[in-house]
Amino acid sequence: MITLKDVKANEQILEFINQTDRAMDALSYTNHGLRHTGVVADRAMKIAKSIGLLPREVELCGIVGFCHDMGNFMSRTNHHYFAGLLFHQIFHDQFEAKEMAQIMQAIAEHDKPEMSFTTAIAAVLVLADKSDVDRSRVSQRNIEDIKKDIHDRVNYATTESNIKVEKEKKRITLALKIDTNFTPVMEYFEIFTERMAFCRTAAKFLGYDFGLIINKFRLL
């Protein structure tokens, strides 16, 4: 069976992710390279384990987490579709048909809030991806340049980002620490309200409530 370790060692996958990072940097986007894909893969596997998915499902969550954004170097608008198709092109004969379909579907759905979830793998990916808000995602190092863009401001102001699963309470909570001296909390909601709603939908599919805590204050 192909594992996350195998995927991480694939030269084509790595090059697609590196080219994506370059393309997003040229557009002045936050990090979509190995830093982001690594965080999302680790976070997806952590969530999957915590809610009790089977070991193979946990592995697939890590794989989709690592590969979900690699189509951005071809098109930002349709990157989720390209990423799914690229994955199939590379590994088409190395996965069982059902697993390949689940992987492709999860990758394709991660940026389409209007889709209805049919697998836990897709729902876990959304939670892992949309919760990755952190200072380390900002590629700009000039503070004045960071202040010019709301996405950079919010990510740079976020000094802590953790997602916690409480299986007994059936709650998945994203806890953030935001430096309000750099940007007001309201700016987080200006750009991430849709993403948090998407996380709520994903958590609900898994049988959980979604919670949001910012600076120790529960907002959801």
Image: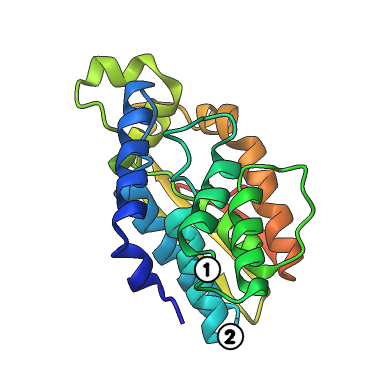
Residue 17: mark in rendering: none
Q: Residues within 10 Å of mark 1 (few under 14, many from 20)?
A: many
For the residues labelled 2 and 1, the Cα–Cα distance comes to: 11 Å
**Looking at the image, residue 186 lies above or below residue 96:** above
Q: Position of residue 91 (x, y in %)?
A: 48, 64
Q: Is residue 34 left or right of residue 46?
A: left
- Report the residue at 52% width, 47% height from top: 83
In front of the other: 198 or 96: 96
Residue 3 sits in quarter? bottom left
197, above or below 56, in the image? above
Which of 215/10 is in front? 10
Q: Give me the residue at 42% from left, 34% from top.
A: 73
Q: Residue under label 1, please give it.
A: 61
Specify whether residue 216 is in view: no
Looking at the rendered structure, the kind of residue marked 2 is Leu
Number of numbered callouts drawn: 2
Residue 100, image x, y percentages: 60, 67
The residue at the point 23 percent across, 21 percent down is: 143
Q: Is residue 58 above or below residue 19?
A: below
The colour scheme used to paint the residues is rainbow
Residue 124 x/y as whole percent: 59, 63
Above/below status of 45 relative to 139: below
User: Secondary structure beneath disc 2?
Assistant: loop
Name the residue furthest left.
Answer: 141
The residue singled out by tag 2 in the image is 54
Q: Earlier in the sequence, mark 2 or mark 1?
A: 2
The residue under label 1 is which amino acid type? Answer: Cys
